[in-house]
Image: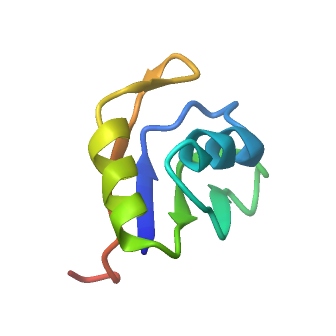
Amino acid sequence: MNIFVAKLNYDTAEDTLRSTFEEYGTVDSAKIIMDKFTNRSKGFGFVEMPNDSEAEEAIAALNDTELDGRTIVVKVARPRGE
């Protein structure tokens, strides 16, 4: 399952994002989206978890919690335009 994570601290590292979600199960990838001009975080990213039940548990547990001093939003990623 692809998970969208928003309102990230601009200093949050991909390793931090990965380890936060690994508490709930296997993580295939954790990617923070970077601005191509400034090479700075855009404040959101995506986490891919192969097990849907673990992913749903992570979404339920982590949505509206604090990570690196910011309250994050965690939900199922939807294709653009949806």
Count of all numbered marks drawn on residues in the image: 0
The quarter of the displayed image where residue 73 is located: top left
Left or right relative to 52: residue 36: right
Residue 35 percent across, percent down from the top left: 68, 57
Q: Please give the name of the residue rendered at 57% of the width and 30% of the height, measured from the top-left corner.
A: 9
Q: Quadrant of the N terminus?
A: bottom left
Q: Please give the name of the residue rendered at 43% of the width and 38% of the height, measured from the top-left corner.
A: 7
Q: Quadrant of the C terminus?
A: bottom left
* Residue 72 drawn above or below residue 71: below
Q: In the depicted view, which residue is nearer to us: 59 or 10?
A: 59
Residue 3 percent across, percent down from the top left: 42, 63
In this view, the residue farthest toward the left is 82
Q: How is the image coloured?
A: rainbow
Residue 53 percent across, percent down from the top left: 34, 65
The quarter of the displayed image where residue 65 is located: top left
* Residue 36 drawn above or below residue 58: below
Q: In the depicted view, which residue is nearer to us: 44 or 68?
A: 68
Q: In the depicted view, which residue is nearer to us: 34 or 79?
A: 79
Q: Please give the name of the residue rendered at 25% of the width and 83% of the height, measured from the top-left corner.
A: 81
Residue 61 percent across, percent down from the top left: 33, 38
* Residue 15 drawn above or below residue 77: above
